[in-house]
Amino acid sequence: MTAPWLVGLDVDGTILLQDESMSPGVPEAVARLRDAGHEVTIATGRSWMATRRWVEQLGLTPEFVVCSNGAVTMRRVGDDWERWHIETFDPSPVLALLRDRLPEARYMVELGSGLRLYTAQLDDWTLDGGRQVGFEELAAEPVSRVVVVSPGHDEEDFHRLVSDAGLNEVSYAIGWTAWLDIAPQGVDKGTALERVRIELGMDRERVLVAGDGRNDIGMFGWARGIGGRAVAMGQAPDEVKDAAGEVTDDVEDGGLATALDTLPATAQVSAGE
């Protein structure tokens, strides 16, 4: 029998279109892999609060889900979930640097508990259960991530800002709608998925990951480095495609389903293996 694969999927621009409808063929392709015995999970920049609905809507049954760009890994416990592994850092230095350069920006931090603190409403971010605070309170305790949204700046502005500010003590990714998402140094989707792979005892070379953003580059490098597969969506930036070993069609054209359909149709391990 074929050993199961660990499949880690980005959400936005990979599973989902911009209007949050499913990419063509994805529900069917995911169900086929799940029913075949593969471990299909999500690896996303979204918080758990904004991720759980897609785990449920896709009918996924993984033991672990990776959120917040690898800083948060959730583990299934019966019918519920627990925060299994959390990475945090002191946000004070980076917040001071950013406030000096982007005083009008809107800021949000996610605490290790999952609570979100924000200075102003952020469009496209799930802030249910969060709390609006003054800027100083954002740095009151360690956080899993810092998000900065500055509508008057584009992606190139953020690249210059990161370079000028010397943001080398934390990891960062620049979103395709021009926000800056900052995680603990050395933490990305790949570091979290490797922890999951080891915990599950799955083969190194039986890994497939798919994504479309700069926050997927670390995950791609991890997968390729252990002999697995990394698939970039067709609409991904060139640097993301360059980091992947494979490129599929755009999300609008069902590129993820096309990539998933290349995996074996059976994945049960025979007795004694």
Image: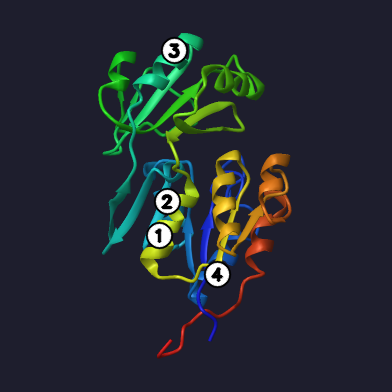
Q: Amino acid at mark 1?
A: Val
Q: Position of residue 18 (x, y in %)?
A: 61, 40
Sequence-wise, the earlier of marks 2 and 3 is: 2
Q: Which quadrant of the figure contains the C terminus?
A: bottom left
The residue beneath circle 2 is 66
- Which mark is drawn over residue 206? 4
Task: Verify CB contact (< 8 Å) between mark 1 and mark 2.
Answer: yes
Amino acid type of disc 4? Answer: Arg
User: In this rendering, would 6 be left or right of 108?
Assistant: right
Q: Report which residue position mark 3 lands on.
A: 99
Give residue 20's quadrant in the image.
top right
Kind of residue indicated by mark 3: Arg
Q: How many marks?
A: 4
Identify which residue, 47 or 190, lies in the foreground: 190
User: Is residue 62 among the parts visible in the rendering?
Assistant: no
* In the depicted structure, whether residue 122 falls above or below residue 103: below
Q: Dot 4: few (<14), some (14–19), or many (≥20) neighbours within 10 Å? A: some
Given this view, does label 2 or label 3 mark the residue nearer the observer? 3
> Gap between marks 3 and 1, in whole Å?
36 Å
Q: Which residue is mark 1?
A: 196
Indicate the amino acid at tag 2. Val
Question: In the rendered structure, which disc, 3 or 1, sits on the residue that comes first in sequence?
Answer: 3
Of residue 125 and residue 191, the one placed in the foreground of this image is: 191
State whether residue 213 appears in this view. yes
Where's residue 174, x and y in %? 57, 31
Number of the front mark, 4 or 2: 4
